[in-house]
Image: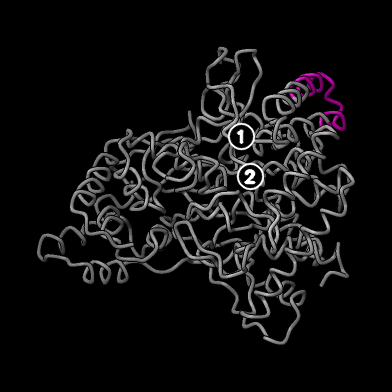
Amino acid sequence: MKTNSLALRWLAWGIGCLAFFLSFDYVEGASSMNTETSELKTVGNQEVPPRPDLLWKDLFTDVQRRAIFDDSKTFVDLVPLASPESILSTYHHVKAEHKLDDEALKTFVLEHFAPAETAAVAYNPDPNEDVTTHIDELWTALTRQPQSKKSPYSSRIALPAAYVVPGGRFDEIYYWDSYFTMLGLLESGRSELVRDMVQNFAYLIDTFGHIPNGNRTYYLSRSQPPFFASMVDLLAGVDGDDVYRRYLPELEKEYAYWMDGADQLQPGEARRRVLRLEDGTLLNRYWDDLAEPRQEAYVEDVETAEASSRDHAMVWRNLRAGAESGWDFSSRWLKDGKTLTTIRTIDIAPIDLNSLLYHLERTLVKANELAGHTDKIDHYRERAAQRLQAIRTRFWNAEQDYYGDYLWQEDKLTGVISAAMAFPLFYGIATPEQARGVAATLERELLKPGGLSSTTTTTGQQWDQPNGWAPSQWIAIEGLKRYDNTQLARTIASRWIHTNLERYNEEHKLIEKYNVINNQRAGGGEYPAQDGFGWTNGVLRALMADYPDVH
């Protein structure tokens, strides 16, 4: 993204300079990263470098603020061909001797950095193959193997087992994407990959105290929707209930991460990802431990803050929290319902997140029962019961029959109708009456010719109308089936399958998101629709198995 704003460039430069003097913890309370060196820190059993903005200093800010690559993510994923000290010394010498225009700067970067070190398997799809064969063969192309030798200053965090990436610009594992990818892997008979991916996520929890957004150093300050317990459910369906006992330590660590600070909270207070209501009920919100531009979306975040009259750090904190939500970005998080500068993610207790945490609490009850840890069962059961009651009351709009996001400081809903309302059905939280209301609202407000739209509003953000996403379809379909509304579930599944197949027949590929109103290629957001695509493949493969007569 190019920008001609001199003020914007000076602001970006200033932010980068400020970062030199700030320290960073991979996890709050962990060892501090010295921003003035490129020292590697041993975390778990691997050495982890500082994140890219701290590692590359003024080279990072020059590259990002001048937007020499079309995508801000490009530079932070490149692999250095020498040590940071050597590259920076050379850069400073060249910079002092010559006036580097954008082309010269790009040439310097390409001479001193290489593309990612995990090359994809070449895959040239046969335009005549059916979509099921396409998906089954594509898993191999999207699979990355453990790295026996990794560049010490790469932003990629090494993982112990094989994993599936989404595709396109996303060449690393992503947390919540992977649950929906696993659905298709199981249907394709690739249970060994599901085991590997669950092992990887357990490793990340054990190493960093949480599952980051993705296995990159610049993602370590946040997580994503906590689907680990649901991944354990999937694997237990294959390997039996011993899976719950095996991963109980990681389930408890995941819960501790999301509930960090809960015991010290007074009514009406929040800390990181947890908040306490006036009546003592604990709920959760999305958060990020940093309040600065995302390294992988640097110029975009600087521009958003510059266009706002708000404190820039607050804008960046909320943008980052929105990225943790997975819905980056959506009118769900926007105070005026349309403008990104009004983002207020941390003011909201989201319906999907709290449904996921309820499921994690119930899973901890089950896992501790299986492990015979009777001293912990009542604690998690009580937490789940309190959250269940709060979701059924505070998150429920009885007049319009939908579950929404809760403004915890104002004790009211945001008023945004979104596909996230189906999460309480998926996890069995809704009462039968509420489930009927949600079904009616989904059909009336969000059902389109191509499936469910994310929201009812068109903002230009990718998680708003007219776009629909595979995770939302799956959650709604399975949630409706759980409450015996098989007809609407079938309607949504049929429309989504046909949307995917229509695009596949035209382009011989599956993509990240779809326009569910007219099936033109989906747009909106910070980057073009990506090909691949992990969770689209997974959900479509599973739905076609569940509805074999639809296609």
Assess disc 2: are there few (<14), some (14-19) or many (≥20) residues with their C-alpha within 10 Å of its C-alpha.
many
Task: Find out whether residue 458 is within the magenta segment.
Answer: no
Vertical position of residue 249 compared to residue 225: above or below: above
Task: Give x and y (percent) for residue 66.
Answer: 26, 60
Main SS, magenta region, reads helix
- Which quarter of the figure is the N terminus placed in? bottom left
Residue located at (57% from left, 33% from top): 414
**CB atoms of marks 2 and 1 within 8 Å:** yes
- Tell me the number on the disc at residue 405: 1
* Residue 467 in view in this figure: yes
Q: Is residue 121 left or right of residue 387?
A: left
Task: Give x and y (percent) for residue 172.
Answer: 55, 59
Quarter-of-image position of residue 533? bottom right
Q: Amino acid at mark 1?
A: Asp
Residue located at (72% from left, 41% from top): 423
Vertical position of residue 44 compared to residue 366: above or below: below
Task: Find out whether residue 379 is within the magenta segment.
Answer: yes
Instruction: Please name whichever residue, 419 or 155, is drawn nearer the observer in this view of the structure.
Output: 419
Instruction: Please name whichever residue, 305 or 229, is drawn nearer the observer in this view of the structure.
Output: 305
Assess disc 1: are there few (<14), some (14-19) or many (≥20) residues with their C-alpha within 10 Å of its C-alpha.
many
Vertical position of residue 447 compared to residue 263: above or below: below
| Marked residue nearer the N-terminal end (2 or 1) | 1
Instruction: Please name whichever residue, 413 or 503, is drawn nearer the observer in this view of the structure.
Output: 413
Residue located at (36% from left, 51% from top): 298
* Residue 87 in view in this figure: no
Q: Which residue was labeled with disc 2?
A: 418
* Span colored in magenta: 366-383
